[in-house]
Amino acid sequence: MSTQKQKVETEDEETAEQKPAADRRLEKKRQKERERAEQVEADEKADFEENAVQIKVFRYDPEVAAKQEPRFDDFHVPFEKGMTVLDALIYARDHYDSSLTFRHSCRQAVCGSDAFFVNGRQRLGCKTQLGELEEPVRIEPLPHQDVVKDLVVDMEHFYDQMHAVEPYFQSEDTPEASELEEQRQTRENREKIKMSSRCIWCGACMSSCNIAAGDNEYLGPAAINKAYKFAMDDREEEELKQHRLNILEQEHGVWRCQTQFSCTEVCPKDIPLTEHIQELKREAVKNNLKFW
């Protein structure tokens, strides 16, 4: 055997001996990496379970046979300081069930889209802090409303009642065109009706009202409050104010209110709804008084 051939055979033998050792080192390295990854995953899971908040969400879908029976689904969402009920719902929808349906828009308590029944009370989802609620957080659609799907309710009747009071400014006494002036309002009058103008049409007050629940024709606190805003505006003429009071004095108007204050308690904009209704009652009485 030549010297060159012996050298090649010797190198092959050394490589064969070294290869298992290299494989063992590589396998050991990979095993450590797997263990580290498993530990990180375990730590993240433990942290998630420790900080997760349980929410129970009402589910109903009339278009799916398996979901036509109302039920509650449980979701666990990671909690962070400042997290709202709406944030929790969005997380549940995006990470667990994309079919979860609810309304939301501005997320700044201005649009009124996300009014829900949370832990037995009407609340805005974007305004309600998750950390201030007892677990499990129970989220349902607004009571006394027809449910379209999950947390979405039919708002058509609510809007009809709002429009019934003609919620827009009316006046035939306009400034002369040449002067190009707006219809000015006194500071005192503006302060008087300021709170009533904060209504965001969320429907929470209507949902909380027992009278509205039993009388489908009752205008409801939101609509009456909207009428208050214009009836108490000094810029409207007396004849037009009389017209608006006639709308409110009907059988299903202000006199159906039983002063339960439930609407005032749940209003997310802190509007003194019951006080406004009572003031309109007084205006109606004064309007019908005749001295002769």
Image: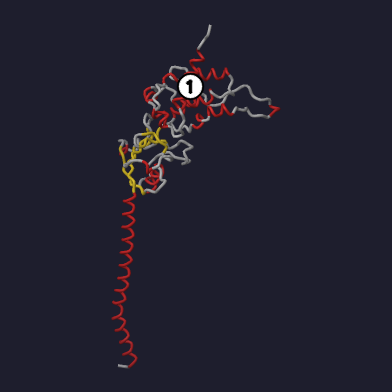
In the rendered image, residue 5, in percent from the top left (x then y), is placed at: 32, 90
Q: Residue at x 34, y 91 (%)?
A: 4
Callout 1 environment at 10 Å: few (<14), some (14 to 19), or many (20+)?
some
Q: Amino acid at mark 1?
A: Glu
Horizontal arrangement in the rendering, residue 116 relative to residue 235 (left or right): left
Question: On the rendered image, what quadrant is the N terminus found in?
Answer: bottom left
In the rendered image, residue 209, in percent from the top left (x then y), is placed at: 39, 26
Above or below: residue 203 compared with residue 134:
above
In the rendered image, residue 113, in percent from the top left (x then y), is placed at: 45, 36
Horizontal arrangement in the rendering, residue 16 relative to residue 184 (left or right): left
Residue reaching furthest to the bottom: 2
Residue at numbered disc 1: 279
In the rendered image, residue 247, in percent from the top left (x then y), is placed at: 49, 19
Above or below: residue 277 compared with residue 90:
above
Residue reaching furthest to the front: 188
Above or below: residue 58 compared with residue 281:
below
Horizontal arrangement in the rendering, residue 278 relative to residue 5 (left or right): right
